[in-house]
Image (cartoon, helix red, strand yellow):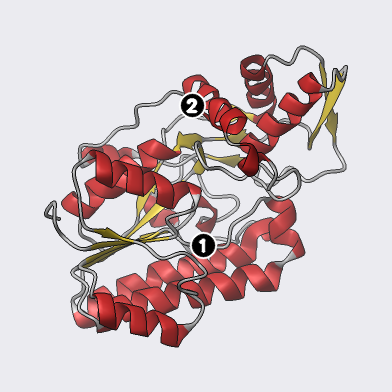
Amino acid sequence: MNKDSKIYVAGHRGMVGSAIIRELERQGYNNIITRTHKELDLCNQQAVNDFFEAEKPEYVFLAAAKVGGIVANQSALADFMYDNMILEMNVIHAAWKNGCKKLEFLGSSCIYPRMAPQPIKESYLLSGELEKTNEAYALAKISGLKYCEYLNIQYKTDFISLMPTNLYGPNDNYHPEHSHVLPALIRRFHEAKENGLSEVTCWGDGSPLREFLYVDDLANLCVFLMNNYSGNETVNAGTGKEISIKDLTELVAKVVGYEGEIKWDTTRPNGTPRKLLDVSKAESLGWKYKVELEDGIRLSYEDFLTNPMRAER
């Protein structure tokens, strides 16, 4: 990409999209175009086609998606599959039809089999059964990834995909029911501290192992890959480090300053027992994460405190 290349970031108001905007601006890119959902409904094929025909973006970061945690995924399986499938197909197809030089599709590590060998290599895709709690979302993301691959094979496009591990950071969703685990813990411990609660109950038994990547590190990788990678196989985005949910809750409580007791509700789902990405491919290309987990949680908590509207989601 040149500094004045026309770049479209789909989903620029979300956590990932807003981080990509920050990174592009930090690196001096000055021709970035965006549209809010009100201005452009990405699930409307005609509207997406009209937008691409009018704007002709040279590069596209496809960060828009319908996202949520375990409860959100389980309660709206059909919505998660339909909205994500339609949205991504519309954007990828319109980008191809309008001569986009390069598109980067952002998926999720949930595309990999539930019981995949650890750490998970990119080549493990479609080698086993998916985790049921987010199967609908995973199937949609696999479809987007594969559509990019098939366009490359059939029409010689340069469309790439990136599969991030669990993300967190500025502009996250802190909704008590629909958020992911880390922002949910930030809100729960903050409110417990504010209300003087002597104990906090967390979901599951604390045993699952998870990997977390600060979203600004992901954004840095997104721009890096757009400039340095072409290929049909996806690229994993993560730290290569994992932590148990139990240890994570204790770390969040420490950062927030909550000193009460932590209890576990084992009637709630744990999700996948372990999910660690093999990030050797990204590292072999010359990229490595920078923000350590405790520092990232501290930055996320600062964001939560200074953005009250986000805390109300």
Instruction: Out of 263 and 244, give the one closest to the viewer.
Output: 263
Left/right placement of residue 78 relative to residue 149 reads right
- Residue 221 appears in which quarter of the rendering? top left
Q: Residue at x 30, y 78 (%)?
A: 52
Q: On residue 296, which mark appears?
A: 2
Residue 249 drawn at (x, y percent): 68, 25
Numbered label tally? 2
Left/right placement of residue 203 relative to residue 95 reads right
Q: On residue 65, which mark appears?
A: 1
- Residue 63 appears in which quarter of the rendering? bottom left
- Helix, strand or loop at mark 2: helix
Q: Residue at x 87, y 20 (%)?
A: 197
Q: On residue 200, which mark appears?
A: none
State whether residue 147 is above or below residue 138.
below
Q: Mark 1 to mark 2: distance in Å?
A: 23 Å
Question: Is residue 281 in sight in this rendering?
Answer: no
